Amino acid sequence: MGNKGREVPRVVCCAIPITSAAGKVLVITSRKRQDLWVLPKGGWEATDGILEAAASREALEEAGVRGRITRYVTTIKSPSTTYHFYELEVSSLDKDWLESKERKREWVDYAEASRRVAWKPELAQGLSLSSIASQR
């Protein structure tokens, strides 16, 4: 079953943390596979209200990122998940954050970010449609 036992696909909100001035993207390691890199993402919860709030919450929990959602990027559907991507202009990074002992984070340029998330087609596609991709 393509939806992993769910009747409806899971709703996942993804932040693309960027610093426009420097032309960089913040990537983080996967919690399950420390050798793989991802963008902050996670399931939408009813307490989030709007999808953008979920993307911001995930960025804070997973990467210690504070900032402002500046742009809706795209929605990508797979059999089990619907991904909603938002650009988040980073204003600051927390020194300690919820998952700081479980993840690494690193600022990289678009080409490097694209290379690192290429293993996950949805993340690579979402990143490729971001404004940071057009700056290269």
Image: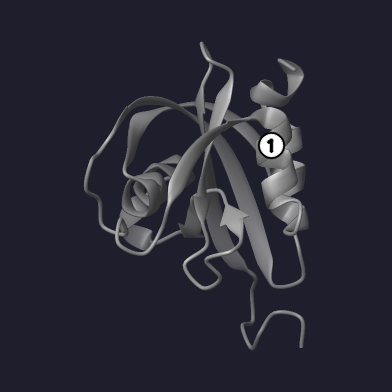
Q: Which residue is mark 1?
A: 112
As drawn, which residue projects farthest toward the left?
96
In the rendered image, which quarter contains the N terminus?
A: bottom right
* Amino acid bearing label 1: Glu
Q: Secondary structure at mark 1?
A: helix
Residue 8 picture quarter: bottom right
Q: How is the image coloured?
A: one colour
Residue 71 image-quadrant placement? top right
Name the residue nearer the viewer: 59 or 79: 59
Looking at the image, residue 115 sits to the left or right of residue 86; the answer is right
**Quarter assignment of residue 102:** bottom left
Residue 14 % position (x, y): 54, 48
The residue depicted at 64 percent of the width and 81 percent of the height is 7
Location of the C terminus (image quadrant): top right
Name the residue at the top extreme.
Answer: 21
- The relative height of residue 106 versus residue 43 in the rendered view (above or below) is above
Residue extending furthest toward the front: 35
User: Number of labelled discs?
Assistant: 1
User: Whole-percent x and y of residue 63?
Assistant: 38, 47
The correct choice, above or below, for 113 with respect to 38 in the image is above
Front residue (pair 102, 20): 102
| Mark 1 burial class by Cα count in 10 Å: few <14, some 14-19, many 20+ | some
Using the image as rendered, state which of residue 111 and residue 17 is in the foreground: 111
Compared across the picture, whether 85 is left or right of 118 comes to left
Q: Residue at x 74, y 44 (%)?
A: 115
Residue placed at 44% from the left, 46% from the top? Answer: 105
Residue drawn 76% across the image and 64% down it: 78
Vertical comparison of 51 with 92: above or below: below
Return the x and y of residue 109 as percentages of the image width and height: 63, 28
